[in-house]
Image (spheres, helix red, strand yellow):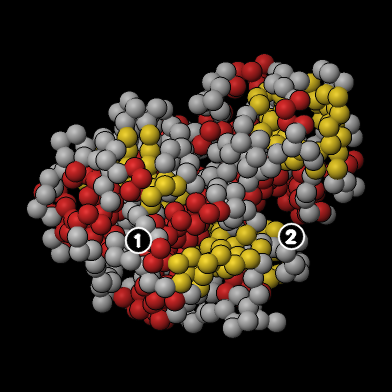
Amino acid sequence: MDLSVAAKIIEQHLVDGRMKTGEEIGIRIDQTLVQDATGTMAFLQFEAMGIPRVKTERSMVYVDHNTLQTGFESADDHKFLQDMAKNTGVYFSRPGNGICHQVHLERFGAPAKTLLGADSHTPTSGGLGSLAIGAGGLDVAVAMGGGPFYLTMPRIINIKLNGVPAPWITAKDIILEVLKRLSVKGGTKAILEYSGEGLNYLSVPERATITNMGAETGATSSVFPSDEVTRKFLEAQAREGDWVALSADSDAEYDDVIEIELSQIEPMVACPHSPDNVETVVELAGMKVSQVMIGSCTNSSYMDLTKVAKILKGKRVHPDVNLVLACGSRQVLKMLADDGSLADIIEAGARVLETACGPCIGMGQSPQSQGVSLRTSNRNFKGRSGTKDAEVYLVSPETAAVSAVNGFLTDPRTLGDAVTVEQPEIFTVDDSMIILPACASEQDEVRRGPNIKSLPQNEALSAVLKGEVLIKVGDNITTDHIMPAGAKILPLRSNIPAMAEHVFESIDPAFPARAKEKAGGIILGGENYGQGSSREHAALAPMYLKVSAVIAKSIARIHHDNLVNFGIVPLMLENSDDYDGINQGAELVIEDIRGSVENGSETLVVKDVSNDKEYRVILTLSSRQRGILVAGGMLNWMKEQSIK
Ligand code: MIC
Ligand code: SF4
């Protein structure tokens, strides 16, 4: 059978199951990454598994999220991560070295490899031809220990990029077009695989912008073939040895094909408060802007930022606009400094931040009240910027730069001839900010600051599931709603009791107190519950508050798996209309839940004792996941398995 790129990589890594769409498969993982906001938990979990050293080809930890350091917490976490990395065989990318996805793309990602990352934008490395997947920290910890990663065999959707992009049309505009067509749900249970003539016009960092933001469609991953463009990028990063050719067979079968005519695409903008709320820039041009943020793992490559520098050169940022800019990596920052671009950026009045996630995750630079912020990042969920009533619009770096100068949203085509930047022959390579692990015999004391609390434990699944609906939320609730990030809460990632105080803060600040008062209960969600980030804290903190089940119209992939990993039962309403009949405060009961999970029942009955109604809910789990749920989560289950 002729295979797609994605199917080839899966086939080469398959260790369990059959490659039949919808069935559970297990794949071997070559590389893993965690970052500082997900890494502390992942390392605590890895430690709890009792495995002394990682068994992957390469495992990385990047410090990029929690770099504001407004208190001791984050600095303590960084030391913990550094020591754990050293002892367990993991490479430690120091704060200041850059954003995990950008640095991984530059220095470690490789075609035909599998990469599992505790961050939802891990598919960025798909721009190089890796099969790169985001997951919860616990799944990544298992992969670090050499265990397979289990996932549902995805549909493979071919996105054909036809023709040549018009001047000023960027990778960001292409992925926004994809989002417009697919929405934040359209990629669910799918891998988006790119092909077509258009590939010739996209460098690896541009491809990576597309695979990065594929995460916003809900896709399991996004992947490009590995071709001459890939080889040249790796050669310029002094790692030609990592290159292998990888392309789809000529008659490769796909579950669906989407054709995009690149010449028809215009500059695009994703409007508040969802990345799929896409319009053309022309439609909104003239809108006053108060902040422009250029950076994030979506758009902060050397080529992106040199284009920005060229647009800004000799101009000044508009007096009503704050322009903030963060490079994706130290490599990018150094190269911009060396070639004078940074001077042009500074001269124009940009506020240059350190190379980190920064404003993308609300770590500083929150916009003014009701501010309009144009950002080159990938998510514009309400409140994520740190300002509840800010309006965040997502655009390309080119649109962002020209708008920063004008003070209003501007179509970059109004500048005339497009600015173009060729990929350099050689990037500046300096890996000295990556600390190598020690050899197995050299084990140091691990520094654990007071912010690092022990892992909360869960109990085995009870015989009967009983509880009150603690909260009823609508469609497309993100993990940012469930477990917010930002400068105040993100530093608490290693302290679940403290984090739990902020669950659902932006929707219903009384939630944690109510959950405690009722000694736990149930969450009722709409469609695509838990979309967005990979943060397992959105399951772990509710588990700490004794939430026993989530009942929703549908649940996003990573969050679904995180719920299982922490022993929370993920249930889908068989009939979505039943959602309307269940209210907050309803007392729900599922008799013999434990027996039903054990015996493989796919349909369960929920009784609403408040009004004597019954609803049917679906549990779609593999037998492995059922075992995990019955044990009360993955760590309990692993312990049981090792005793057997
Ligand atoms: C995000 O962009 O939301 C994050 C912060 O990078 C998260 C990871 C986290 O919450 O630590 C993600 O995308 O998975
Ligand atoms: Fe960091 Fe933002 Fe990328 Fe998440 S999306 S990894 S917060 S830059």
Residue type, numbered disc 1: Thr
Q: Residue at x 34, y 61 (%)?
A: 169
Residue 424 lies, in percent from the top left, at 25, 73
Foreground tag (2 vs 1)? 1
Residue 298 lies, in percent from the top left, at 39, 54
Residue type, numbered disc 2: Gly
Left or right of 329? Residue 188 is right
Q: Is the residue marked by circle 1 packed among few (<14), some (14-19), or many (20+) residues within 10 Å? A: many
Kind of element beneath mark 2: loop
- 358 or 287, nearer to the observer: 287
Left or right of 605? Residue 331 is left
Residue 383 lies, in percent from the top left, at 43, 32
Disc nearer the start of the sequence (2/1): 2
Q: Residue at x 53, y 33 (%)?
A: 481
The residue at which mark 1 appears reads as 170
Left or right of 574? Residue 397 is left
Location of residue 574 with respect to 263 vertically, above or below: above
- Mark drawn on residue 22: 2
Residue 491 lies, in percent from the top left, at 43, 35
- Mark drawn on residue 367: none
Q: CA distance from mark 2 to mark 1?
A: 34 Å
